[in-house]
Amino acid sequence: MYTQAMDIPDESGKKLAAVSNAPSDQEAAFEARIDADGRIEPQDWMPDAYRRTLVRQISQHAHSEIVGMLPEGNWISRAPSLKRKAILIAKVQDEGGHGLYLYSAAETLGTSREQMLEGLHSGKAKYSSIFNYPTLNWADVGVIGWLVDGAAIMNQVPLCRCSYGPYARAMVRVCKEESFHQRQGYEALLVMMKGTDEQRAMVQDAVNRYWWKCLAMFGPPDADSPHSAQGMRWGIKRISNDDLRQKFIDATVPQAKVLGVTLPDPELKWNEARGHYDYGQIDWAEFWNTVEGNGPCNKERLATRVKAHNDGQWVRDAAQAYARKQKERALKEAA
Amino acid sequence: MNTPALKDWPLWEVFVRSKQGLEHKHCGSLHAADAAQALHMARDVYTRRQEGVSIWVVPSVAITASNPDDKGELFDPAADKIYRHPTFYEIPEEVGHM
């Protein structure tokens, strides 16, 4: 669903075996391919730092998809109709699928599923902070589709042109599916806006709580984003945090108008000279506080995720025991 | 806190035929205990929107890949054999499409 990874340091990727001291002609070939906007594939030589950056970014991205199932998953049993329930189940299932595409892409870089899950479950690895906020009412589910997935799409579309082949291919698949996520959310909100005053107030309340968090999803301002330049150089990141944020705001303002909600920023106004909307100050202290683990739901999300994983252990064990038994039986029959 | 994850579940490569008459195309990979489970998972992970009419799963270890370092000797010799392409040959205009 989303990546803020370039800017958020964590432990992932550090444990990879270093394939260092490569001859400089390999490095030159790598640089030349990057300069020519070519693609890097798993077996190609790549600098350690490129590999580590990708492992960190792709694994954080995968973790975000997986944890991203939780805030909405809360609402599956309480969806207002069978139709909305079916839609929500499909969406949450997509997020799980996106996590799997991305874990697979990261594994091509030499990390393992186990290492990545260990990073997530121990709290060493990061995931998108947006999922550390609660989903208080049904309108939150619509707003997550419209704004959170909308921001995610802005972030992810340029990643389809990422220099690392497996990541780019996974993103093409993700982006195709993500469009449904945003549209279903927006449509759910349109329906609520045609309802009662209370329902309209719920939508406005959800927008008020999520707007600024969504703007923070694009990561720190370019000036405070030390990894960004290298990521751009390597063709991992294609558009800067601030430019993506601006694109998102410019696209969202007219959608808010059609929906009939107010975006909670008194400084939000069209700037004729820039050809963009101006906007107010994002609370970065709050963002970093949540990234560091002190948001309203960090502990709950992680605990739920770990419990789900541990509760599924018997299924994994049973599948493995069955596979082993089948193999033994086949061997015996062949003998 | 953690239980063993997918350490013993091998990796499978997934190929999907999008429609009858087209080839199976590689679309990704996944971990599964055995072939039957790999097929089930591939169905859920890669064909939620009717992307396919047929799936192949292959243990990743069964694939032998060419080495990128050998790219030159494997593929470059073909570069100067332009006579293998139809555009190498000039045919009089009046012959039309050939």
Image: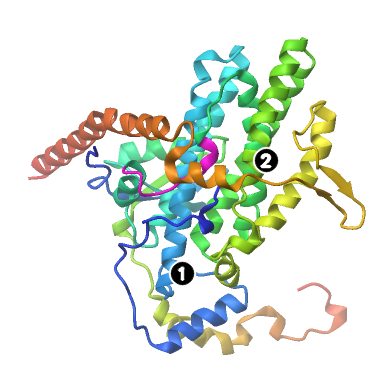
Q: Can residue A1 be seen at all in this image of the molecule? A: no
Under mark 2, the amino acid is Gly
Q: Is residue A91 visible?
A: yes
Where's residue B31, x and y in %? 33, 45
Q: Residue at x 62, y 86 (%)?
A: B82
- For the point 45% across and 89% down, the residue is A25
The chain carrying label 2 is: A
Identify the residue position indicated by label 2 in the image.
A150
Magenta segment boundaries in residue numbering: A122-131
Which amino acid type is marked by label 1?
Tyr
Q: Nearer the viewer, residue A27 or A266?
A: A266
Identify the secondary structure beneath mark 1.
helix
Q: Residue at x 77, y 40 (%)?
A: A252
| Residue A128 % position (x, y) | 51, 44
Question: Disc 1 sits on a residue from what chain?
Answer: A
Query: Going from the N terminus, do you reach mark 1 or mark 2 first?
Result: 1
Residue visible at 62% across and 73% down in the picture: A37
Q: Residues within 10 Å of mark 1 (few under 14, many from 20)?
A: some
A224 or A27, which lies in front? Answer: A224
A216 vs A42, nearest the viewer: A216
Quadrant of the rendering where the N terminus of chain A is positioned: top right
